[in-house]
Image: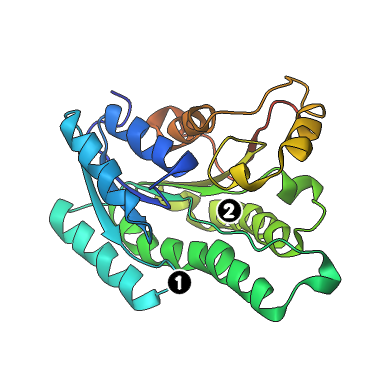
Amino acid sequence: MRLKNKVAIVTGGSRGIGEAISQLFAKEGAIVHIWDLLEEGEIVAEQIQQQGGKASFKKISITDKEAVEAEMAKIHEAHGKIDILINNAGITRDKTLTKMSDEDWDAVINVNLKGVFLCTRAVVPYMKAQNYGRIVCAASNVGIRGNFGQTNYVATKAGVIGMCKTWAMELGKYGITANSIAPGYTVTPMTDKIPDALADQAVKFIPLRFKADPIDIAYGYLYLASDEARYVTGICLPIDGGTSR
């Protein structure tokens, strides 16, 4: 098992890519703590337990600084360590620039960027003390190339890429790696909202000519969270069928 007895936190781990990460990490031996506002997280944790894995669910907003820090402390107290943080939680509020409200902008920035900052800042002291840590954050290939109607979302994903590069520089001496993953078109509840005609058109621009399943992305997270990636830090790994080549 590639993550045997590793303690992992997966934000947004209730569905889509997050659920796939939670399930895969548990199969690889990790003790998985799922953080989400969606009640489905409880079901995912129960499924993992029924399959012989170790998982728990906490309903928590990653924008709540006090709650994040308190829950991080509880997990560390229970296990004596926190090995892996997967910053996967995210939202969209898509509109073109002139139609995007302040509320649309603030909501996405608060979750996708500030939430990642808050969770990472809270976990780093524990990782520094143990001289070990794996931080992997959800970016997107639109953070590399831009995307129509997603000023707020693209800004957050480009920001995540930049933050991880900075953390790689700051935290490497403590045995902590920080990387991001840039998925392309992946079949999730978020992309299910896209009209079929637009979805079919998007696939034509993917060199591999098909949409990813969440597990395709989860395997990238597994690698970067494992000891096999001990010399990999500060990168953004596109997993998008060649779209951002």
Task: Residue 100: give its label.
Answer: none
Residue shown at 70% from the left, 80% from the top? 102
Left/right placement of residue 230 relative to residue 91 reads: left
CA neighbours of label 2 inside 10 A, class few (<14), some (14 to 19), many (20+): many
Would you say the residues marked 2 and 1 are in contact, meaning their CB atoms lie under 8 Å apart? no
Q: Position of residue 76 (x, y in %)?
A: 21, 58
Quarter where residue 35 is shown: bottom left
Is 66 placed above or below 236 here? Answer: below
User: Which image quarter holds the C terminus?
Assistant: top right
Q: Earlier in the sequence, mark 2 or mark 1?
A: 1
Q: Which residue is mark 1?
A: 63
Distance (Cα) linking label 2 and label 1: 19 Å
Q: Which residue is mark 2?
A: 164
Is 245 placed above or below 102 here? Answer: above
Front disc: 2 or 1:
1
Residue shown at 65% from the left, 63% from the top? 93
Quarter where residue 75 is shown: bottom left
Residue shown at 21% from the left, 41% from the top? 46
User: Which image quarter holds the N terminus?
Assistant: top left
Is there any visible trace of residue 101 in the rendered image?
yes
Q: Position of residue 123 (x, y in %)?
A: 36, 60
Helix, strand, or loop for circle 1? loop
User: What amino acid is at disc 1?
Assistant: Thr
Q: Position of residue 20 (x, y in %)?
A: 42, 35
Hey, which residue is sitting farthest front in the picture?
196
User: What amino acid is at disc 2?
Assistant: Cys
Left/right placement of residue 219 relative to residue 152 reads: left
Is 117 placed above or below 139 here? Answer: below
